[in-house]
Image (spheres, rainbow, N blue to C red):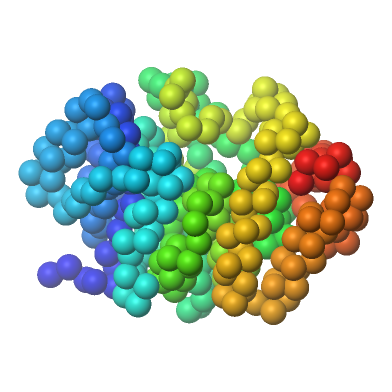
Amino acid sequence: MRQTDSVVTILMAVRDGGRFLPAQLASFAWQTHPDWRLWVSDDGSCDNTAALLRAFASRGHDLRLWSGPGQGASANFMSLIRRLDPDRAGWTAFSDQDDVWLPDRLSRGLAALGEGACGRAGLYCSRTWVVDQSLRRVRRSPPRRHAPGFRNALVQNIAAGNTILLNQPAARLAARAARMVGPVAMHDWWLYQLVTGAGGMVLHDDAPTVLYRQHRRNTFGRNTGVTARAARMRVLLGGGFRDWNRQNLDALGLLAPMLTEANRGLLADYTRACRAGPLAAAAAVRRCQLFRQTRAETMAIVCAAALGRL
């Protein structure tokens, strides 16, 4: 008999994933924690994605398939979060369609949150092995120099969606919150902001748990190396970050009652400053002690604010 309190619901958003999907599905079957079910939202695939999923289900795997909203990957994942029962949601993991999970992807997260969260909302995430489309050229994603927290989450996402696992309190929090917001910049960033803002715990594992496959159709590419760092700086200073930031602040504003008192105040201060103008925004980044994981990127946030790009 399945132990309900140990079942992990895997949420996977797909679209035209047939080329790499078989390897990802096989990696679910290899998990050392075998008690899982798979929920998939297909955002209008025109290839053999649906057939592959049906074949996987026919081999005895617990799989449910829905049609996605057709508004991109983030909206597709949010549609799956809204399908969770706000009162009964349990362990919940997130998966992309083109990666490969290491066998302990679920068991490491379950053990970490079981020991560390102590009944609080908890989000587990980890580093990844960044690989090419043939799963070669292995490189680890960057380490995290500073502890996770809301002051970091407001200006940076360190929770890679393909590594996230939520415990029951966090999954229920996310299910309730998802019904209250509209579009979000990125579902994984939103989860990082929500859990930290509500006073939950985020555990970032230094051990990789996923082979993060890079190919030309990635929604977001790798975050390692000089080229990736330069791309992040272009986003910060070029204005692209501003749209994400404003979307995040709008969503968090709707969720203010779910946040701790201290984090509600921090959010209100930062939001007012961003709306007041460049100088106020730059001052607020420093006053609120917001930070990214490297000093250079933290300074880039201050510069972006001063240039009116927050």
Q: In this picture, is 91 found above or below 20?
A: below
Q: In this view, does 105 lie to the left or right of 300?
A: left
Q: In this picture, is 116 found above or below 20?
A: below
Can residue 188 be seen by looking at this rendering? Answer: no
Image-quadrant location for residue 50: top left
Q: In this picture, is 70 found above or below 83?
A: above
Label tally: 0
Please identify the residue farthest to the front as the structure is shown: 276
**Residue sitting at 32 percent across and 75 percent down?**
88
Please state the horizontal and vertical placement of residue 172, each as a whole percent of the image.
41, 71
Please state the horizontal and vertical placement of residue 13, each as a whole percent of the image.
35, 43
Q: In this view, does 191 lie to the left or right of 296?
A: left
Q: In this view, does 25 lie to the left or right of 224?
A: left
**Residue sitting at 24 percent across and 27 percent down?**
46
Can residue 31 be seen by looking at this rendering? Answer: yes
**Residue sitting at 32 percent across and 70 percent down?**
85
Please state the horizontal and vertical placement of residue 15, each as a whole percent of the image.
32, 34
Please state the horizontal and vertical placement of residue 231, each as a whole percent of the image.
68, 27
Q: Where is the N terminus found, in terms of image quarters?
A: bottom left
**Residue sitting at 58 percent across and 67 percent down?**
254
